[in-house]
Amino acid sequence: MNSYKLDPAWYYTSPGLAWDAMLKMIELLSDYEMVLMINHGIREGISTIWNRYGKVNNKYMGESFDNSKPSSFIIRSSMSTTCMDG
């Protein structure tokens, strides 16, 4: 509260508070290169986790691969580049 002058009682979630704290930090930066680095790192999108725990079993795991079990993978996909404003 003292560092960023933000009241946590006004936020529904801690990520919202963290986002506003980050925006306040950007305002305090005096080095233009640092501001550009942070601005280029911001990405839009939605993150979803369907399961609480995921376990993989595939040939790329090396010694941990179990031939007796079916192969499974974890897929990361990004839709931000396919969605465009019309």
Image: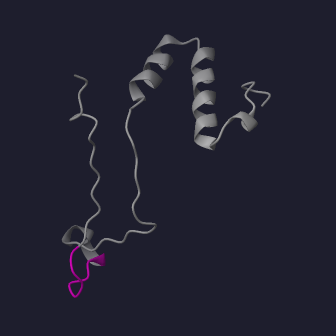
Query: Residue at 26% across / 41% down in the picture?
Result: 79
Q: Quadrant of the C terminus?
A: top left
Q: 63 or 81: which is nearer to us?
A: 81
Residue 14: x and y, percent?
A: 63, 42
Q: Tell me if residue 65 is in the magenta stretch.
A: yes
Rendered position, 79 above or below 42? below
Q: Main secondary structure of the magenta part?
A: loop
Q: Tell me if residue 17 is in the magenta stretch.
A: no
Query: Residue at 41% across / 29% down in the picture?
Result: 41
Q: 41 or 51: which is nearer to us?
A: 51
Dividing the picture into quarters, in which one does residue 24 lie? top right
Dividing the picture into quarters, in which one does residue 56 lie? bottom left
Rendered position, 4 above or below 53? above
Toward the front, the furthest residue is 86
Residue 6: x and y, percent?
A: 73, 28
Query: Residue at 30% across / 77% down in the picture?
Result: 64
**Image coloring type:** one colour
Residue 52: x and y, percent?
A: 46, 66
Range covered by the magenta-colored residues: 64-71
Toward the bottom, the furthest residue is 68
